[in-house]
Amino acid sequence: MKSTTRTPAWSASPTSVFDYWKWRVTDRSGRALALVLTENDANLIAAAPELLEKLTRCKNWLSSYPGDGADSMLQEVRAVIAKAEGRE
């Protein structure tokens, strides 16, 4: 299987905008998406597209799980995805 390296959809980097904001989140083209105070916040925002993609894959896997053992987890995952997509 061939391994491919993907450029992250968003990335975080230090900044000094207005001497207040410490971290900037940008898209692939370098456009600023968010200015935040902490590195943790910047990293979480930068990871959001990939987190949503992986959680959606997890939901699809849970949906195919036989029996009802995964039902409660599947409901929680669906709720979080809906929140992330602005549907809740």
Image: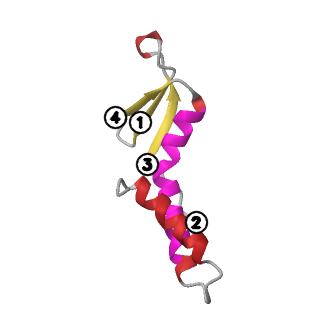
Which circle, 2 or 4, is nearer the viewer? Answer: 4
Task: Please state, as top left, top right, bottom left or bottom right, where the N terminus lies in the image.
Answer: bottom right
Q: First in sequence, mark 2 or 3: give its number.
A: 2
- The vertical placement of 31 against 74, above or below, is above
Distance in Å between CA atoms under marks 1 and 3: 9 Å
81 w.r.t. 11: above or below:
below
- Quadrant assignment for the C terminus: bottom left
Kind of element beneath mark 1 = strand
For this rendering, which residue is in front, 84 or 16? Answer: 84
The answer to whether residue 77 is seen in the rendering is yes
Say what amino acid the circle numbered 4 marks. Arg
Q: Residue at x 40, y 32 (%)?
A: 34
Residue denoted by label 4: 31
Asked if disc 2 and disc 4 are in contact, CB closer than 8 Å, the reply is no
In this figure, which residue is indicated by the disc labeled 1? Answer: 26
User: What is the crowding at mark 1: few (fewer than 14 residues within 10 Å), some, or many (at least 20)?
Assistant: many
Disc 4 to disc 1: CB gap under 8 Å: yes
- Residue type marked 1: Thr
* Mark 4 → mark 1, Cα distance in angstroms: 5 Å
Residue placed farthest to the bottom in the image? 66
Residue type indicated by callout 3: Ala
Give the Cα distance between marks 2 and 4.
Answer: 28 Å
How many residues crowd mark 4 within 10 Å: few (<14), some (14–19), many (20+)? few
The residue at the point 52 percent across, 34 percent down is 42
48 shown above or below 78: above
Name the residue carrying label 3.
9
Q: Which is more N-terminal, label 2 or label 1? A: 2
Apparent side of residue 52 relative to residue 87 in the rendered image (left or right): right
Q: Which residues are magenta?
A: 40-60
